[in-house]
Image (spheres, rainbow, N blue to C red):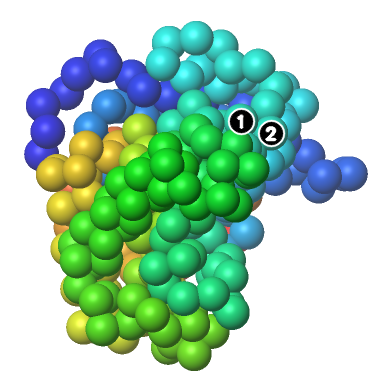
Amino acid sequence: MKAETDDILLAVEHVSLSFGGVRAISDVSFDIRRGEIRAIIGPNGAGKTSMLNVVNGFYHPQKGAIRWRGRARARMKPYEAAAQGIARTFQNVALFKGMTTLDNIMTGRNLRMKRNLFWQALRRGPALDEEIANRRVCEEIIDFLEIEHIRKTPVGALPYGLQKRVELGRALAMEPELLLLDEPMAGMNREEKEDMSRFIVEANRYRGATIALIEHDIGVVMDLSDRVVVLDYGRKIADDVPDKVKSDGKVIGAYLGVSH
């Protein structure tokens, strides 16, 4: 467990979000500290994915604020959040199915490539040097994720577990300061979950990514996370270290349906 610190990378402050008359998030506050693995859990419909969508700029809350690196963040688009160092994977895999594993991961380097479209099309001189340097980074990520054998395979032909790994690779290619993972182990068998858990821990410890993840496998959450925030019907019902959260009566009630 990492030592408690005041080094807050992102803070969610009294955020509320509604769709018509449906309240998805209601006055939720929590923070994500630099260097930690922060889990966001809760039953289906608790508002977890909506919260990630607020953090990466896909949704804009009606109330409250997001503070990024200590400053209140202006209303922004997802690509602007990405430019500031926030990367994202999705509950349903969002890859370019006709492109190879390597080419999908290379798309994560777009923000790092400074040459304009004209130079990239020519693939000469400085533009070629830049592409080679960025391709080298992607090849290293492929080695890290142990997917060398599928580097030239169109991702649409891959099994679901490997597609999730490729999507993680694309997010890591952005060299994010904050990595948002939405159910990274959904649909995986036990062996695949063990591999993904290892990659998440190593991305956090050795690649410097602060991680916020949504995950339904509570055993995985408790093993991986430094802290856990629990949502139920859009409200925060717990926020603490894993050992305390898993014994919290409100959390047990929400998952067993007692509070419903």
- Check whether the beta carbons of the residues at disc 1 and disc 2 lie within 8 A of each other: yes
Q: Dot 1, crowdedness within 10 Å: few (<14), some or many (≥20)?
A: few
* Point 28% across, 40% down: residue: 209
- In the rendered image, which quarter contains the C terminus? bottom right
Q: Mark 1 falls on what kind of element?
A: helix
Relative to 171, say whether 55 is above or below. Answer: above
Q: Which amino acid does label 1 sit on?
A: Glu
Residue 170 lies in quadrant = bottom left
Residue 80: assigned label: 1
Disc 2 residue crowd, few under 14, some 14–19, many 20+, Cα 10 Å: few
Question: Which amino acid, by three-letter code, is at mark 2?
Answer: Lys
Q: Residue furthest top?
A: 71
147 lies above or below 189: above
Residue 21 position, x and y percent, is: 87, 44
Separation of residues labelled 1 and 2 (CA atoms)? 5 Å
Q: Name the residue under label 2.
A: 77
> Which SS class for mark 2?
loop
Query: Up-down: is 89 above or below 20?
Result: below
Q: Between residue 251 and residue 97, name the one nearer to us.
A: 97
| Closer-to-camera residue (195/80) | 80
